[in-house]
Structure formats: C-alpha cells, structure tokens
Image (cartoon, rainbow, N blue to C red):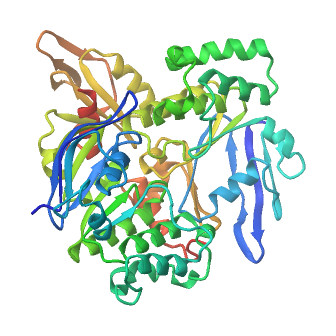
Amino acid sequence: MNAIEIKNIGLKYGSVVALQDISFEIERGELFGLIGPDGAGKTSLFRILTTLLLADSGTATVDGLDVVRDYKQIRNRVGYMPGRFSLYQDLTVEENLNFFATVFGTTIEENYHLIKDIYQQIEPFKNRRAGKLSGGMKQKLALSCALIHKPSVLFLDEPTTGVDPVSRKEFWEMLKRLKAQGITILVSTPYMDEAKLCDRIAFIQNGKILSINTPEKIIADFPYKIYAVEAENNYEILKQLRENPAVRSVFSFGDSLHVIFNGELRIENGQLNVQTEKNNYQLSIVNCQFKEITPTIEDCFMALVNE
Amino acid sequence: MENRVISTNKLTKKFGNFTAVDSISFEVEKGEIFGFLGANGAGKTTAMRMLCGLSKPTSGSGTVAGFDIAKQSEDVKKNIGYMSQKFSLYDDLKVWENLRLFGGIYGMKDKEIAEKTDTILHELGFEKERDTLVKSLPLGWKQKLAFSVSIFHEPKIVFLDEPTGGVDPAARRQFWEMIYAAVERGITVFVTTHYMDEAEYCNRVSIMVDGRIEALDTPKNLKTTFNAASMDGVFQQLARKATRGEN
C-alpha cells in the first residue's frame, strides 16, 4: 500500500483553477518533494491531503485512509507543518510541545527520541514564548510539534523558505534522519537545489504537475544540449543572445549563462555556428567559451515551463 | 566623496548586553549592486534598519545618500527606496492605487505620478492590470511591481530585503534584469538574498557572521580567497563559523 495516493484531484477558488487533475502516488518511507514557485498549488494540495480542505473533484488516500470519509483517523496519523508559523505565540516552547503531545494522547518523554536531534537545539530556550523566537528556532519548534505524536506521514509545507543556506542544509540532514526512521515525508519547496535531496520529485506550476521522477532521471531525460558561457559582462551577452534567432533560451545561473540553441552548435576556427532545420546562423560573440554541461534541476524546470 | 552612497564607521547596535551589530565599517559606491549576506540571526536586519534611519546606532556612525543616519534620519528616509519580501504593497488596493499612494507619500506631484504610472505599467506590461487588486497578482508579478514602487520616487539607493524569496525561477531572473536596468539609470542597489546564485550577480558582496562583516569583496575574489567553486561554498565556510547561533 502506498503512503499517499492522489487521483484526479481538482480544485477551484471561484474562477481561479488552483489544482488541475492531479494524480500521483507516494511510496511508504519515501522522501518526496513537491517543487514549484509560490502560487503553484502546493499549499492547496497539502491542505486537501491533511483533510483541512475539500477538493472539488477526485479522490485521495493517506495511509490507506480516505481524506473525506476517514478524516478523523488521518488527523491522528499525520504530522503537518504549515508554511505559515501556526503554533501558539503566547505559550512557551515547552508548553507548545506539551500541548501537542497531550492533544494526541501522548507525552514528550514517550517520543523524545524522534525529536531529540531537533529539540535539543531549542531546549535551552524552552521557557521562551514561541512568539519571541527567531525564524530558524520557530521552524525547529514547529517540526518538533509536528513529530511529537510519531506520525506515519509528515507534511512539510515550504519549511525552508526564507531560511539561510547553512540552516537549510542542516534541515535537510534532519529530514534524512527522519526518513531513516521509516516516516514518509512530503515536502514542498521553491528552492530547486533542494530537489536533488529527494527520492522523487514532482514539478508543479499553475496547478498542474509538469513531471514526476527521480531527480537523476529528470536530469537524464533533459531533451536539449545545454551550454554554459562565462563573460566579463554576462548581462550584455545575455541581451545579445536573447535577440539571436538561433537561441532557444538563455538564463543567468550564478556566474555563468546557460544557453540552449535551436539547433546544433559547431565551433570552427573560433567561429560559432548554429545549424537549425532551415538556416545556418553565425553567432558574433567573441572571447566567450561555450562549454557543454549537465543541466541542473532548475534548468529542467525552466525548460518544462517554457514549453 | 559624493560617489559614496553608503559609508559606515564602526557602526554598532546593542540590545541590552547583546551586540546585534558589532562595529561594521564599509562603503558602497554609486551605481553598485551590493549584496548583503549572512545567516539568519547574523545581524543583517538590524544593520539594514539602521541604514534606513529606522533604528539609532548605539555607537559608531554612518551616512546614507549623503545624510547622517542618526541625526538626519528623516532625510535618509526621503532619499531611499525599500522593499522586502514580507511587506511591500497593499493587497487590498489596486495596482494604480498603490503607485498613487507611494508617490503621494514621497511628495510627488499628481501629474508626475500619473505620467510615471503610465510609464511603469507599460514597462512591466501591466497595462491590463491597472485596476486589479494587488492580492490577486501572482507573487512574481507582485514583486516586480513592488520593486517599481520602491524606486518610483527615483531614490539614490534602494534597499531590497530578500526580494525574490519563493519566486519562480524565470520571474526571479526577470527581477534581476529590472535591478540591472535601475543600476543603468544610476540607482544604487543594496540587496539581501538567500539564493547564492544571486550573490554572483552582485558587484560586491559582504558576509556577516555574529554581527561582524567577515568578508567583503567581489564574488570572483571571494571564491579565490576561500578556494570555493561557488558563492554557496564561500557562504557555507563562513557562516559555519558562527558561534552565537540564533537568538
């Protein structure tokens, strides 16, 4: 039995389509990433799966239970960390954790082993009110509260948005350890570089799933040759390339530009030629090295969105 | 001297016995894109609040856009622009109403506001969205509009606090092209981000650790100095040295 099964889920807010015919499964013990920008529909899908919102169409199960019929049982079995901090601001760190343990009929002691790694980092501040915590500490408390009843499926909605790169790395190390304990994790993120840390990912944009696979397979299936180019003034080169009909797409990537051509790139005597179906184009770009590279997950996402 | 848009000398902010910003001294030149990086809790927000004239330094001094941040904070506010991920526009006002409101706050004349509104909506390709409530715009559009609003009054410098958090990859890049365009018009840009690829788009970058500026240079030089392939590598090395953690 899969941990999560989603079949033809659709949702509208008035005339706005939030989710369109979404279907996929998440295996037990999988660390599954829902990758997409703000407004893609990630939170709506999370809310449907955690029984907080009814879909307009389709069905879904979590832990084999129907999200509509068996909502009460599901709520006992899942942990949910919403994107917006939703603990009690005027309770202390320890009071919040105690509250969630009690609501689920357990104690902090009983499941302390699950949260130990995370909770220890905020334990020195256990008498501080949650509202007075910094962003990173709130995030750790929220994760502790979502875990304290030993859920079988954990839903994390953008846990790392606005978090610095070092803390993000630490957070993903924690997720790996939770996965090792057998917990199924569905995590959403707008950071494309986090995708490669998941077992499988789904790209989502405008309420539609663009692709589902392992990160490695998504990269291997990339249909174009992609080149990196570095120049003194990348922005100037970017503008030149974008005007050129031989160029399919060009985007900034850190210190280089990533370019996809509409045909085969040939370099002869330092001259760049692109042979498309109909024409041969010369590129008058000098002093630049075009190097073929393996695409990143972000390249894959942008190419899919472009289509 | 007039080429320095920001200049600080041992700028310090203490809260009780906690030193949030610890004697930072740096300069930003006119027309620069200056990346202000640091882990959560490193002191970026506190430093930025002082530079914007919203918080008085405990000791040390600084000038922004030619005005003293402690003694002339009102003049500082008039000559800067500010935009953050969390707050930038009024959701329940229409697109044109937001532009009208911010123009008015900065003392622009009605005619000037009307003309500039047309120009900006045209540049953004937002002509059809003039009467749309801001809350119904996608985040990427909102952030582009917010940036236009933040430089609506042609400030000398604009402070951008994590302007692209959560924005989709293509919109994030369009946003940076707007930054380049603003720089070409002579506006200086001071930006914080958690996307390390964006750090590469800055002319110079500073990295704060425990309230101090631990490194300040061009991305290229920083990568050489720290023997790292990317700015992420530089950041990871420096930020892991932090001892005070988040408070």
Position in image of residue A198 (x %, y %): 24, 59
Rendering coords of residue B201 (x, y %): 48, 41
Most extreme residue toward the top is A278
The C terminus of chain A lies in quadrant = top left
Which residue: 34% across, 29% down? Answer: A287
Question: Quick check: can you spot residue A83?
Answer: yes
Residue at the right extreme?
B71
Callout count: 0
Vertical comparison of A250 with A31: above or below: above
Report the front residue among B105 and B210.
Answer: B105
Which is more toward the observer, A75 or B117? A75
Q: Residue at x 33, y 25 (%)?
A: A286
> Going by the image, does B64 lie left or right of A300?
right
**Which residue shows up at 40% across the image and 55% down it?**
A158
Q: Residue A277 location, x and y as percent?
A: 11, 14
Q: Can you say whether B127 is above or below A94 in the image? A: above
Give the percent coordinates (x, y) of residue B230.
39, 53
- Of residues B139 and A220, the one nearer the viewer is B139
Seen from this angle, which residue lies furthest bottom?
A109
Q: Against A74, is B179 above or below?
A: above
Quarter residue B22 falls in? bottom right
In the rendered view, tell whether residue A213 sits above or below residue B106. Answer: below
* Quadrant for the N terminus of chain A in the image: bottom left
Q: Is residue B179 visible?
A: no
Can you tell which quarter of the image residue A304 is in?
top left
